[in-house]
Image: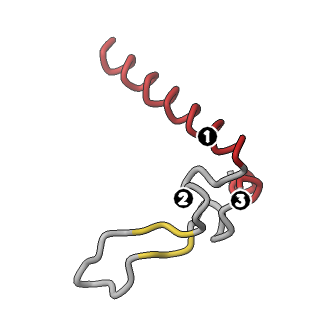
Amino acid sequence: MGLLNTFDRWKETRYQHHVSMMKEQGKCPDCHGRGYTVYPFTEFAYFNSMDCPGCQGSGDYADWEETR
């Protein structure tokens, strides 16, 4: 289980680094400041982008932080 724990710590450290970089830039970490997320096109959906659920479509870090 040591290998899995190491992988989990590495993944968490990488995510925290991503969040801190986005905080410096003032962008939402989920959508990288775009305000929307892109989903793969499927036969059941005619759209492939939606407002980001993390920042409610604004792209700002402050709005993302409020939802956390």
> Which residue is labeled 1 in the image?
19
- Residue that protrudes farthest toward the front in the picture: 25
Residue 31 circle label: 2
- 17 shown above or below 46: above
Q: Secondary structure at mark 1?
A: helix
Q: Rounded to the nearest whole Å, what is the CA distance between mark 3 and mark 2?
A: 10 Å
Q: Element type at marker 2? A: loop
Q: Are marks 3 and 2 in contact (CB under 8 Å)?
A: no
Precedes in sequence: disc 3 or disc 1: 1
Badge 1 or badge 2: first in the primary sequence: 1
Q: Residues within 10 Å of mark 2 (few under 14, many from 20)?
A: many
Q: Identify which residue is drawn at 38% across, 17% down.
A: 6
**Residue closest to the eye, 68 or 60:** 60
34 left or right, relative to 37: right
Q: Secondary structure at mark 3?
A: loop
Pointer 3 residue: 60
Q: Give the Cα separation between the discs numbered 1 and 2.
A: 11 Å
User: What residue is at 74 percent from the left and 59 percent from the top?
Assistant: 63
Tell me the kind of residue under disc 1: Val
